[in-house]
Image (cartoon, rainbow, N blue to C red):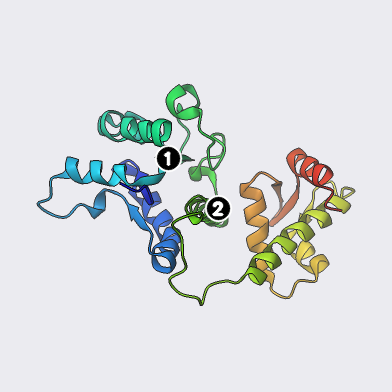
Amino acid sequence: MKRDGVFISYSKKDVKWLDYLRVHLSFLEREYKLTIWEDSKIEVGAEWRTEINKAISATKVAILMVSANFLSSEFINNEELPALLAAAKEEGAYIFPIIVSHCMFSDIEAISKFQTINPPTKPLTVMDEGQIDALFVKVTREVKRVLSSDTVTPHNHNIPTSIDVLKASFIRVKVMNILFSKTENIDGLSIKEIYTLSNIDKRKEVIRVIHELEALEILDKSKKGNITYYKLTSLGHNFISEHALL
């Protein structure tokens, strides 16, 4: 069976995070007709083990929504995880762990060897809404990237063009360069200051990029009074230096 699907493994106690992620992934379902599977897809009266095994056998990308609830689930650890890990080892499936809450993820060798979408020290539970949106956009793009080589064909040509992608990349570089050149600002710069210096027309595009860079740990934020300030992390400085973005 061809592997071209996405399987989401999660604890039912964390269903609110699944619902949030599904909102973002629905773009891929609608525009590219991808199959994104989680256990709510099991129809009433269906044999659940057979349905799950069928879904896993077609999985190219497995998203693990890791939390203490996830790690304590006997069903996940005895049924879903072994099959998904075997698919990764034997047939090249991708494993994308998302850290939902602080847990013992880093101590579990079988899954901690996979690169997480967000750092274990920065789970979803400590992020604000903008950071979570940026992270789930990252997940969606990673899923599309993995599947794009042989399975993803646009269903609707009215999708963002390469010009849109290029523009987003330009804004990211511009925001990073602004913060790099303003190292004398110990606290960093506010969104208003970054937006003003960027000369970008749409403020929301600048805000989206700031949250994306924060989720990637390129930016760090601090609060002074009611104003949030952003500055480059050491990772951000190194990235600019290594890639000669200035």
Which residue is denoted by mark 1 in the rendering? Answer: 93
Mark 1 packing: few (<14 Cα in 10 Å), some, or many (20+)? many
Q: Which mark is residue 196?
A: none
**Sequence-wise first label, 2 or 1:** 1
Q: Secondary structure at mark 1?
A: loop
Q: Amino acid at mark 1?
A: Ala
Which residue is denoted by mark 2 in the rendering? Answer: 138
Determine the residue positioned at 63% across, 46% down: 216
- Vertical placement of residue 32 versus 177, above or below: below
Q: Position of residue 84 (x, y in %)?
A: 35, 36
**Left/right of residue 12 with respect to residue 185 in the rendered view:** left
Q: Is residue 204 visible?
A: no
Determine the residue positioned at 30% across, 35% down: 80
Q: Is residue 179 visible?
A: yes
Determine the residue positioned at 25% across, 52% down: 40
Q: Amino acid at mark 2?
A: Lys
Q: CA distance from mark 2 to mark 1?
A: 18 Å
Q: Position of residue 140 (x, y in %)?
A: 49, 55
Q: Position of residue 121 (x, y in %)?
A: 56, 34
Mark 2 packing: few (<14 Cα in 10 Å), some, or many (20+)? some
Q: Nearer the viewer, residue 196 or 41?
A: 41
Label pair 2/1, CB-CB below 8 angstroms:
no
Q: Secondary structure at mark 2?
A: helix
- Which mark is in front, 2 or 1? 1
Q: Position of residue 25 (x, y in %)?
A: 43, 58
**Left/right of residue 29 with respect to residue 129 in the rendered view:** left
- Vertical placement of residue 67 versus 61, above or below: above
